[in-house]
């Protein structure tokens, strides 16, 4: 009887779909990462990435443009854009210094404090750093390409060869969209992971 019960449980585990098996891996050799995206996400064709070029996340200007992108259309449109940041930060101290530099820069550029058009400046809502994954997460209230309001989530991921930037674009108040972006970025596997040097 115990063997039969074990056989039924094993068959259920193998045959029933799990969230991991429902996810599709997208490998980007140029940037050195794999991301697993659940059903509903699709890759943005390379020619369509230029449509996002006017968007500014407030963290760093893009020299090479967006290099990859993914879109989730249900229930509201959610985008995840990817680029690389120039430079290399690999030690615990230099990562901390760069994080502080980024956060201070965003605070100085907040609407009401920056010169020029306040609408072009994102407003920093919260910032956090995960030492285990070497990832800075910034949540901001920003402006979409079409001029509407949006929630922007920027992740700076430190690798041994440089820094990657993932930017989630979500409708304001769409908590499910924010969770979907967080879940996607948490699935990242890096070809060149970073062990911090002290």
Image (cartoon, rainbow, N blue to C red):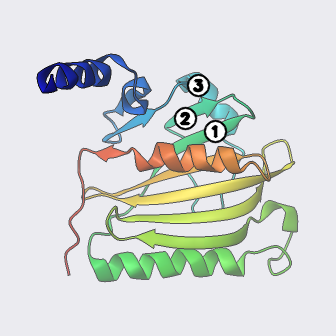
Instruction: Provide the residue designation for mark 1.
Output: 79
Q: Which residue is drawn at 30% across and 33% down?
A: 29
Q: Do tag 1 and tag 2 residues touch (Cβ < 8 Å)?
A: yes
Pointer 1 local density, CA inside 10 Å: few below 14, some 14–19, many at least 20: many
**Secondary structure under badge 1?**
strand
Instruction: Provide the residue designation for mark 3.
Output: 40
- Comparing labels 1 and 2, the label whose residue is closer to the camera: 1
Q: Which residue is drawn at 69% across and 33% down?
A: 51
Q: Nearer the viewer, residue 121 or 21?
A: 21
Q: Quadrant of the N terminus?
A: top left
Residue 177, image quadrant: top right
Q: How many marks?
A: 3
Q: Nearer the viewer, residue 187 or 79?
A: 187
**Secondary structure under badge 2?**
strand
**Spot occupied by residue 193 in the image (x, y as percentages of width and height):** 24, 54
Q: Which mark is residue 69?
A: 2
Upstream in the sequence, badge 3 or badge 1? 3
**Secondary structure under badge 3?**
loop
- Comparing labels 3 and 2, the label whose residue is closer to the camera: 3
Q: In which quarter of the image is the C terminus?
A: bottom left
Residue 3, relative to residue 92: is it above or below?
above
**Spot occupied by residue 135 in the image (x, y as percentages of width and height):** 41, 63
């Amino acid at each position: 009887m115990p063997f039969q019960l074990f056989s039924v449980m094993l068959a259920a585990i193998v045959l029933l779909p799990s969230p991991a098996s429902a996810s599709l891996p997208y490998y980007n050799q140029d940037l050195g990462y794999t991301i697993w995206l659940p059903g509903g996400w699709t890759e943005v064709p390379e020619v369509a990435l230029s449509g996002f070029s006017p968007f500014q996340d407030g963290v760093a200007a893009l020299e090479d443009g967006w290099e990859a992108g993914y879109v989730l259309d249900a229930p509201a449109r959610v985008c995840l854009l990817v680029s690389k940041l120039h430079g290399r930060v690999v030690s615990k101290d230099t990562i901390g210094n760069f994080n502080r530099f980024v956060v201070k820069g965003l605070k100085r550029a907040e609407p009401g404090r920056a010169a020029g058009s306040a609408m072009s400046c994102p407003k920093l809502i919260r910032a956090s750093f995960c030492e285990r994954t070497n990832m800075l997460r910034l949540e901001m209230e920003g402006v979409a390409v079409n001029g509407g309001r949006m929630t922007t989530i920027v992740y700076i991921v430190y690798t041994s060869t440089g820094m990657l930037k993932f930017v989630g674009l979500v409708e304001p108040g769409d908590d499910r969209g924010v969770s979907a972006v967080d879940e996607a970025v948490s699935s990242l596997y890096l070809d060149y992971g970073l062990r911090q040097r002290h």
